[in-house]
């Protein structure tokens, strides 16, 4: 069991409508995550929710997306229903919302890239981050790697993430690469208050 204390933060990545079944960039079982995340969020004093927040003319958008070359269908466009957090995801007053991907000329998957997240966490004395959300093989992966590079200890909650899995197997490879680089991969059941 892993005891959670004041130096720990829950980082929930991109649990947004466009990544849910029926969304513009649907992840097959993405809609199971809000309830999993809600079960554990209360044990963390510090919670951060990130969101893709793209302008309509974002560089990654394509009418003929290739996925593997970083071209995607338009998704999570600012101020649209697709960019909203899933309605079942519990976000409380005092939780931090971080928008990313809002530069129209730059694609960035990491919640640290182009945001004040690292500074904000440090100002609160956070040393360890626990990551849940979407997608394992893109935004979760890059956020975890940047968290390590920034000097945080990083855990990915394996049953609280889901991958695009394009190309096939990329979600499993992402978790393996994270393990090899020192990220702890655990189940939410291993957390304790």
Image (cartoon, helix red, strand yellow):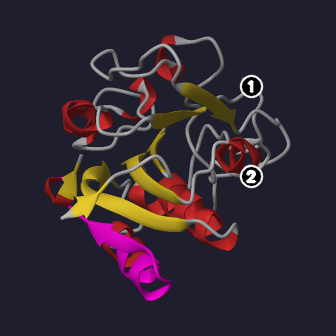
Residue 95 in magenta stretch:
no
Give residue 24's position: percent from left, percent from top.
Answer: 45, 30
Q: Are marks 1 and 2 in contact (CB under 8 Å)?
A: no
- Estimate the x, y position of residue 158 in percent, counting from the top left: 26, 60
First in residue order: circle 1 vs circle 2: 1
Res 27 label: none
Point 53% across, 22% down: residue: 83
Query: Is residue 98 at least partly visible in the picture?
Result: yes
Disc 2: CA contacts within 10 A as few (<14), some (14-19) or many (>=20): some
Does dot 1 land on a helix, a strand or a loop? loop
Residue 186 lies within the magenta run: yes
User: Which residue is at a point 74% across and 52% down the rendered structure image?
Assistant: 113
Q: Is residue 67 visible?
A: no
* Residue 57 vertical position relative to residue 37 in the rendered view, above or below: above
Q: Which mark is residue 113?
A: 2
Residue at the extreme right: 105
The span shown in magenta is: 175-188
Q: Position of residue 50 (x, y in %)?
A: 55, 36
Residue at 82% of width from left, 37% of height from top? 103
The picture quadrant where one finds residue 99 is top right
**Residue positioned most to the left:** 189
- Out of 188 and 87, give the one closest to the viewer: 188
């Amino acid at each position: 069991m892993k005891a959670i204390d004041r130096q720990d933060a829950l980082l929930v990545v991109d649990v947004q409508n466009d990544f849910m079944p029926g969304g513009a960039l649907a992840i097959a079982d993405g809609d199971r995550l809000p309830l999993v995340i809600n079960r554990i969020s209360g044990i963390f004093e510090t919670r951060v929710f990130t969101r893709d927040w793209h302008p309509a003319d974002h560089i990654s958008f394509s009418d003929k997306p290739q996925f593997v070359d970083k071209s995607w269908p338009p998704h999570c466009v600012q101020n649209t229903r697709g960019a909203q957090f899933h309605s079942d995801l519990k976000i409380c007053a005092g939780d931090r919302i971080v928008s990313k991907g809002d530069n129209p000329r730059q694609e960035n998957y990491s919640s640290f890239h182009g945001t004040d997240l690292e500074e904000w966490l440090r100002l609160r004395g956070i040393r360890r981050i626990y990551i849940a959300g979407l997608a394992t093989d893109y935004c979760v992966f890059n956020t975890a790697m940047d968290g390590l590079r920034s000097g945080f200890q990083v855990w990915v909650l394996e049953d609280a993430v889901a991958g695009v899995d394009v190309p096939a197997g990329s979600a499993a490879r992402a978790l393996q690469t994270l393990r090899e680089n020192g990220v702890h991969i655990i189940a939410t059941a291993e957390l304790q208050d």
